[in-house]
Amino acid sequence: MSETLEKIVAATAAKLHKNVSEIDVDAPIEALGIDSLDAIELMFDLEEALGKTLPDGFIEQGMTPRKIAERLEALAAK
């Protein structure tokens, strides 16, 4: 698991008050229990954890923690 994915899993688990082992990295975030408000808050949590500002709407419906990590890593590579 990449460091980026680990941070996303940790932030998601914290938001949901769950253990990181309970987060399926390939499940859509709404299936994990993240609603639209939680997604916005999660984005802010990730910005803080990663020290980066993310574009508005960065986390979209249907994204998985793994897809979010891949998108972040692609953004960082630019």
Image (cartoon, grey):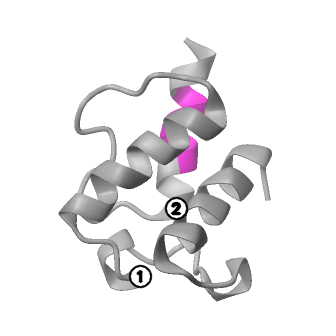
The x and y percentages for residue 31 are: 34, 83
Q: Quadrant of the N terminus?
A: bottom right
> Label 1, on which residue?
32
Q: Given the image, on which type of amino acid does mark 2 rest?
A: Pro
- At horizontal 59% and vertical 21% (from top left) the residue drawn is 76
Q: Is residue 24 above or below residue 7?
A: below
From the image, give the main secondary structure of the stretch colored magenta.
helix
The quarter of the picture where residue 43 lies is: top left
- At horizontal 60% and vertical 55% (from top left) the residue drawn is 8
The residue tagged with tag 1: helix, strand or loop?
A: helix
- At horizontal 40% and vertical 27% (from top left) the residue drawn is 54
The x and y percentages for residue 56 are: 24, 30
The residue tagged with tag 2: helix, strand or loop?
A: helix
> Label 2, on which residue?
65
Q: Is residue 43 above or below residue 17?
A: above
Callout 2 touching callout 1 (CB < 8 Å)? yes
The x and y percentages for residue 45 are: 50, 46
